Image (spheres, grey):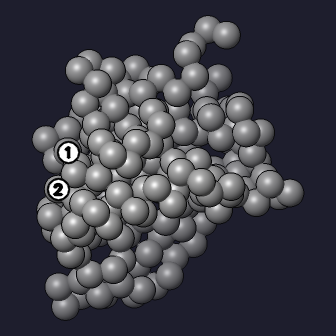
Amino acid sequence: MTRPLFQGVLIRLAAVNAETQADAAARWSRDPEYSRLLDSDPARPVPASRVKADLEKQEIKNDGYSFSIRTLTGDQLIGFLDLDGIQWSHGNAHLAIGIGERELWGKGYGTDAMQEALRFAFDELNLHRVTLTVFEYNPRAVRTYEKVGFREEGRLRQHLNRDGRRWDMIYMGILRSEWEAESS
């Protein structure tokens, strides 16, 4: 073992702690841009009590793993990462990520977290493929996903309505063999 599990260059993936994360996640939900990049539902602030209840439910799910994303420097909580909907018999999972601290957007934290998530998915869980969805109006995320090896696999054309315009929802995926070729 040459590298610690769950630790990248900039971040570490940590256990979810509903007590300490609820306030941060509720604060992030008050940022409409963050909410619109994260979810196709209309942006709305969510109270910490609801976030806490949702996080507590995630702690006991058996078809996935939820992590908080923390900086290595200062151990700051900056986001979340979920690897869920795991189909163990097929080796498939869905990945979702959000960096809530806006001042850290575009600084490599998301890329580092994605690399660690894929390492966990393929090396530890022995999965075959990981998929995700991203919105056409989020080119920064698309570039991040492509940088770690995801490929576009399809689109739901004009699936989302934002500010009077229709946008595609993009499906992306990466296979274990592609990840191994990227990371060697």
Q: Horizontal and vertical percent for residue 79?
A: 32, 45
- Expressed as whole percent of the image width and height from the top left, the position of residue 132 reads 53, 60
Q: Residue at x 86, y 57 (%)?
A: 89
Residue at figure coordinates x 50%, y 82% from the top left: 156
> How far across and how far down the image is residue 114, in percent?
47, 40
The residue under label 2 is 27
Placement of 55 over or under 76, stated as above or below: below
Query: For the residues marked 2 and 1, what is the alpha-carbon distance in whole angstroms?
Result: 10 Å
Which residue is identified by label 1?
101
Question: What residue type is disc 1 on?
Answer: Glu
Precedes in sequence: disc 2 or disc 1? 2
Labelled disc at residue 142: none
Q: Nearer the viewer, residue 44 or 51?
A: 51
In the visual, does 94 lie left or right of 32?
right
Taking the image as shown, residue 63 lies to the left or right of residue 7, namely right
Q: Give the camera-side residue of 129 and 13.
A: 13
Q: Nearer the viewer, mark 2 or mark 1?
A: 2
Residue 133 shows in this picture: yes
Left-right relation of 38 to 8: left
Q: Residue at 65% of width from left, 41% of height from top?
A: 121
**Quarter holding the N terminus?**
top right
